[in-house]
Image (cartoon, grey):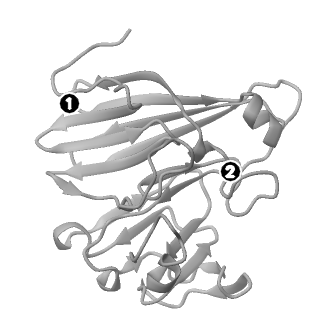
Amino acid sequence: MQQNFDNISTIHPQKIVVLDRGDYTSCTLNLHGATVTSWRIKNQEMVFVSRQSHFTGLSHIRGGIQFVFPVMGSWIFGPNHGFARDLPWDLEEGPNKTDTGDVYAIIRLTANPYTNALWAYKFKLYYKITLYEYKIVFNIGVENISEIYPFEFNIMQHSLMRVPDVTKCEFIGFKNCRYKDCLKNNEMMKEEREKVTISEHTDRIYINAPNQVVVTNVMKGGSLKIVKKRTRDINLWNPWTEKSLTIPDLGNNR
């Protein structure tokens, strides 16, 4: 049963779900691709969405927090990073408010003839987004509904965060991690730095990364703590100026 509360939006005709906690703290979820296109804390935007991004429903939204499934990276059977970020999802429940004032919604993607043509497995994805005062939490469920055929998959939250100056950000927690440098023929290397910084095109996959990484100098000079559970790797990516210019719907961003 769905309950309605003040300051909580229901689904819009444009397939947008808004979680509004009040006090200018909100999250906007586009059901196309299950993409979080805005996360505001006290009216400060936390995620980046390109001005050139398309919202036509014909391709994924460039930016925000994207949902990647069933593969990460290039895919000979379909679009890069799979099909989940390119398809419309269904609103399963919400938006609802908890007793503590937090707001959540649950959305769902189910196998269909299009996904079966690319990836011949029956599945259901469940995605719960909960907005708190100073954090946002994502719970992901993957169900194999075939009862016969097991399958393997990759899943990733492709998060593009908005920061005042990426060269002043420090990523803390990667020291002593091994990583695959995707820009150097996937060469395996070890991170020696206590604080990782970005000053050029970067694309690294930190293998068995720690469950907690801190990013400094984000909103108003504060820090962002990224916490993961039951997932393995973290991809650190920034296209920098030159690579950005080669991505038509991204433009001159870094």
Horizontally, is 156 left or right of 164 in the view? right
Vertical position of residue 48 compared to residue 189: above or below:
above
Residue highlighted by disc 1:
101
In the rendered image, which quarter is residue 122 located in? top right
Q: Farthest residue toward the left?
A: 23
Q: Residues within 10 Å of mark 1 (few under 14, many from 20)?
A: some
Residue sitting at x 63%, y 79%: 179
Check the image and report above or below for 26 versus 80. above
Q: Position of residue 115 (x, y in %)?
A: 74, 36
Spot occupied by residue 18 in the image (x, y as percentages of width and height) = 30, 34
Return the x and y of residue 112 as percentages of the image width and height.
72, 28
Q: Which mark is residue 82?
A: 2
Relative side of 59 to 12, left or right: right
Q: Identify which residue, 22 or 87, lies in the foreground.
A: 87
Look at the image and tell me in which quarter the N terminus lies.
top left
Question: Earlier along the polypeptide chain: callout 1 or callout 2?
Answer: 2
Q: Quadrant of residue 250?
A: bottom left
Q: CA distance from mark 1 to mark 2?
A: 35 Å
Residue type, numbered disc 1: Gly
- Disc 2 crowd rating (10 Å Cα; few below 14, some 14-19, many 20+) is many
Q: Secondary structure at mark 2?
A: loop
At a point 44% along the width and 58% down the height, the residue shown is 63
- Residue 76 horizontal/vertical position (percent): 81, 58
Q: Nearer the viewer, residue 176 or 104?
A: 104
Q: In the rendered structure, find residue 18 and report the number of the disc placed on it.
A: none
Residue drawn where x is 74% and y is 48% of the image: 153
Observer-nearest residue: 242 or 130?
Answer: 242
